[in-house]
Amino acid sequence: MIAYLGAMAWLFAVVCFGAIIPIVPTGAAVSGAATLAFHEHHPLTIVLVVAFGAAGAYVGDLAMYAMCRLGGEKLARRLRWLRDEEHLASVKLRLEKSPLPVLLVSRLIPGGRVPVLLAAAFLGLSWRTFVAANLPACALWATVYAAIGVAGGSIFPKPWEGVVAAVILILVVNQSISWWQKRRDARTAPST
């Protein structure tokens, strides 16, 4: 059990770090851990993957939100979190109208979490609202990515095959959504 807890601590650290530094593939880390947990044949291990993955995402999001609230746009530019100001403006409008659904969904959309966190911080969204909306968002995110890992683990007989399949699936889905969003934005850009 000590080995499991050590592995879960590493998962927490990787996901927490990846929530602050968005280049780390946190979804792939959770999916890979869930695949390995599935092959251990201990259902509790999969629950631990979801719990530690969600906790890492939550703590990382809180740290990033605090950094954005305290450092403002100047810090966001320095860390290269702020790239598309037009998109940020539209996210701010959506957050003003309905903050909870936007915060809940932002974690599930590839590339959606950072602009929403920035917009929420720059708008001065209350800590209470952010904390309340981010908790279920992180839990849902970890559950979805763990389910992808379990699916990969159940299809392939060897753990490494399931991990590779889960990572490839996540990369394909993320790239497809990014491509679709860029294409949609390109079509709407000339009309504005």
Image (cartoon, rainbow, N blue to C red):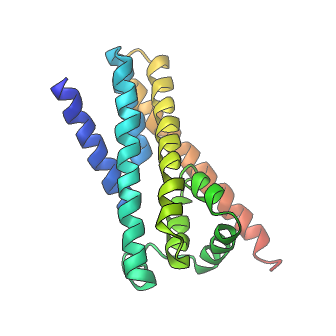
| Residue at the farthest left position | 2
- Above or below: residue 112 compared with residue 12: below
User: At x 56% / y 49%, what residue is drawn?
Assistant: 108
User: At x 41% / y 35%, what residue is drawn?
Assistant: 50
Quarter location, residue 37 = top left
Whole-percent x and y of residue 138?
47, 47
Whole-percent x and y of residue 126?
51, 69
Q: Is residue 38 visible?
A: yes
Who is closer to the viewer here, 122 or 184?
A: 122
- Above or below: residue 184 compared with residue 30: below
Quarter location, residue 163 = top left
Whole-percent x and y of residue 48?
35, 30
- Above or below: residue 129 compared with residue 2: below
- Residue 42 shown left or right of residue 176 in the figure: left
User: At x 40% / y 50%, what residue is drawn?
Assistant: 57
User: At x 71% / y 68%, what residue is drawn?
Assistant: 97
- Above or below: residue 129 compared with residue 154: below
| Residue at the farthest front position | 128
| Residue at the farthest right position | 191
Count of marks overlaid on the render: 0
| Residue at the farthest bottom position | 74
- Residue 92 shown left or right of residue 139 in the figure: right
Who is closer to the viewer here, 149 or 97?
A: 97
Q: Is residue 25 visible?
A: no
Which quadrant: the C terminus? Answer: bottom right
Which quadrant: the N terminus? Answer: top left
Whole-percent x and y of residue 24?
36, 54
